[in-house]
Image (cartoon, rainbow, N blue to C red):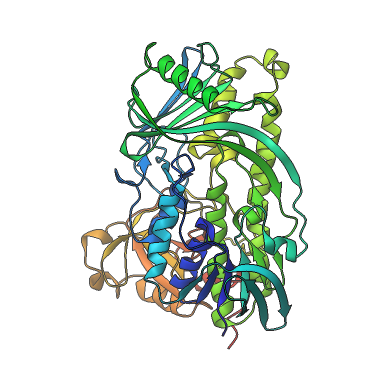
């Protein structure tokens, strides 16, 4: 079987290659660059709880240390001199966080740190080959695979089973597939600076609307990074206002002075730039055996939303579906579900941002007539920045074509069907206690029995007792390999509830007790219908 070809060696392409390797699928990554990434401290990424866990699992390391990334301790919103909202972040819980101070902390790090760590992981992965200085220029498909040609120091033909274009906003793959990419240009513009300094609120991210000092502009955001570094973003008018070096230094000095009581503290300027946000969505994300992911499929980022978050969710969603088709035979319903799930989720986020922009950025208008609207606007912006609500929360696949038919055996738990599951402690097959998310991305379904009291006994004592033998037999009979785990508790779940979870961590269904027929039907639906072909 030919490898999967991944076009593009940015964070999404590298993450997809590593995710496929965890599913035992070989890949070839076509990198048109030299295999190294430019260090730009002002080019940073904010990862929510689910995507941070995903890349840490792939890279085999934590990014929340003092040298690579920073998890924010809290979030503060101000309007002029008034504090509008303060949030304190808790420990990551991987799932739907309550709308309160238990919100998990976002992870903020330079993009080159993330990409470099993924490259290091790939260097030790025998199933991933990276071809540097290889720019795609042609692509042909047939019934059994694809043939791609790259130009560079050595013109090369590549044969693949599938191909995924992770090659950015100007995607060659998208153009070769003749896929339209409609949307809006320059939705927002920001002047950006990365600098090392001391601010009065170490570790705290800040959104300041209408700052009171002269030349403060409409909005400025300060977000901490590791090593005492901060990224500052100033919202610019949609058109005009050329940002010269002198003008940017003046903005920096005025902002720091405004936040530090009138005197500009010492600072070291590391990097600057202008970030322009576009909103675009590809019409199709799949053509035959070729797919789009990341910026090749969508562009977003206004109102604090994070485009890379969505690109990494693309990779997580697509990897296990490609792997199942690669190992067990081409399965169109499963592969079609990638576009159905991911495009719908990104479209909803773009729609929410586009509907909110006129109110939040459009002068007086509606704000003059809506009582308390300033706090409502601030709450909306906070959602985008911290990862909740329509602008920030992970997508749910409740209406996925992979969702099972309704069953009378279903029971309600703290996670809605299609949503990302909570990261509870579970007992693994070898008897070890692990976190649920550590078992994700390994190519199989997860079946979790909620059984209070089992945590105080060794697994061998209860594996042959009560309902366990019947559940174990039902799991063995499923149409796709599954791993049986046991949890003492799960948010909102009654005792003896059985959860079926996809390889990407989304809940398929929760059943009241051991229901072999219903569990089988749900598993069959989750993998695209029917047992894997021989």
x, y percentage for residue 497?
43, 59
Q: Is residue 306 left or right of residue 137?
A: left
**Vertical arrangement, residue 98 with respect to residue 428, above or below:** above
Residue at 64% x, 27% y is 242
In the rendered view of the protein, which quadrant contains the N terminus? Answer: bottom right
Indicate the position of residue 353 as horizontal and vertical percent values.
65, 36
Q: Give x and y (percent) for residue 340.
A: 68, 59
User: Which residue: 55% across, 20% down?
Assistant: 375
Left or right: 283 as drawn, with respect to 325: right
Residue 83 visible to an observer of this rendering: yes
- How many numbered marks are there? 0
Q: Nearer the viewer, residue 69 or 431?
A: 69
Against 468, is 97 above or below?
above
Closer to us: 397 or 106: 106
> Which image quarter: residue 435?
bottom left
Q: Extreme front residue here?
A: 153
Q: Residue at x 70, y 15 (%)?
A: 364
Q: Nearer the viewer, residue 229 or 156?
A: 156
Task: Look at the image and tell me in which quarter the C terminus lies.
Answer: bottom right
Residue 443 visible? The answer is: no
The answer to whether residue 44 is left or right of residue 525 is left
């Amino acid at each position: 079987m030919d490898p999967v070809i991944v076009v593009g060696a940015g964070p999404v392409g590298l993450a997809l290659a590593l995710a496929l390797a965890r599913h035992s699928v070989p890949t070839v990554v076509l990198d048109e660059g030299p295999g190294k990434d430019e260090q730009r401290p002002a080019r940073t990424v904010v990862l929510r709880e689910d995507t941070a866990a995903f890349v840490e699992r792939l890279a085999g390391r934590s990014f929340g240390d003092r040298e690579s990334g920073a998890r924010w301790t809290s979030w503060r919103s101000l309007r002029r001199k008034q504090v509008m909202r303060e949030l304190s972040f808790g420990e990551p819980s991987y799932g739907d966080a309550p709308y309160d101070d238990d919100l998990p902390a976002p992870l903020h790090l330079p993009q080159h740190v993330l990409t470099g760590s993924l490259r290091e992981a790939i260097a030790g992965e025998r199933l991933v080959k990276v071809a540097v200085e290889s720019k795609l220029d042609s692509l042909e498909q047939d019934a059994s695979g694809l043939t791609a040609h790259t130009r560079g120091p050595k013109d090369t033909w590549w044969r693949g089973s599938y191909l995924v274009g992770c090659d950015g906003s100007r995607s060659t793959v998208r153009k070769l597939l003749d896929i339209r990419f409609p949307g809006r240009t320059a939705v927002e513009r920001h002047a950006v600076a990365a600098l090392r300094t001391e601010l009065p609120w170490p570790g705290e991210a800040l959104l300041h609307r209408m700052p009171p000092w002269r030349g403060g502009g409409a909005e400025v955001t300060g977000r901490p990074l590791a090593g005492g570094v901060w990224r500052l973003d100033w919202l610019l008018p949609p058109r005009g206002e050329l940002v010269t070096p002198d003008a940017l230094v003046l903005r920096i000095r005025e902002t720091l002075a405004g936040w530090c009581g009138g005197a500009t503290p010492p600072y070291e300027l590391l990097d600057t730039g202008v970030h322009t946000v576009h909103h675009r969505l590809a019409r199709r994300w799949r053509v035959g055996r070729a797919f789009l992911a990341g910026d090749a499929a969508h562009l977003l980022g206004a109102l604090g939303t994070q485009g890379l978050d969505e690109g990494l969710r693309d990779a997580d969603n697509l990897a296990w579906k490609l792997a199942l088709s690669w190992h067990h035979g081409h399965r169109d319903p499963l592969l079609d579900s990638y576009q159905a799930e991911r495009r719908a989720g990104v479209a909803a986020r773009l729609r929410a941002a586009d509907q909110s922009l006129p109110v939040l950025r459009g002068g007086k208008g509606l704000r003059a007539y809506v009582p308390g609207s300033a706090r409502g606007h601030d709450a909306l912006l906070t959602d985008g920045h911290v990862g909740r609500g329509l602008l920030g929360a992970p997508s749910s696949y409740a209406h996925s074509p992979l969702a099972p038919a309704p069953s009378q055996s279903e029971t309600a738990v703290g996670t809605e069907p299609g949503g990302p599951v909570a990261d509870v402690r579970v007992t693994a097959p070898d008897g070890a206690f692990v976190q649920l998310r550590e078992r994700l991305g390994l190519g199989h379904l997860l079946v979790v029995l909620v059984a209070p009291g089992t945590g105080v006994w060794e697994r061998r004592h209860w594996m042959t007792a009560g309902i366990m033998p019947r559940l174990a037999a039902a799991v063995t009979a499923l149409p796709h390999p599954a791993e049986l785990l046991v949890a003492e508790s799960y948010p909102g779940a009654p005792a003896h509830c059985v959860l079926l979870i996809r390889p990407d961590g989304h809940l398929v269904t929760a059943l009241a007790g051991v229901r072999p027929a219903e569990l089988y039907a749900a598993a069959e639906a989750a993998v695209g219908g029917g047992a894997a072909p021989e």
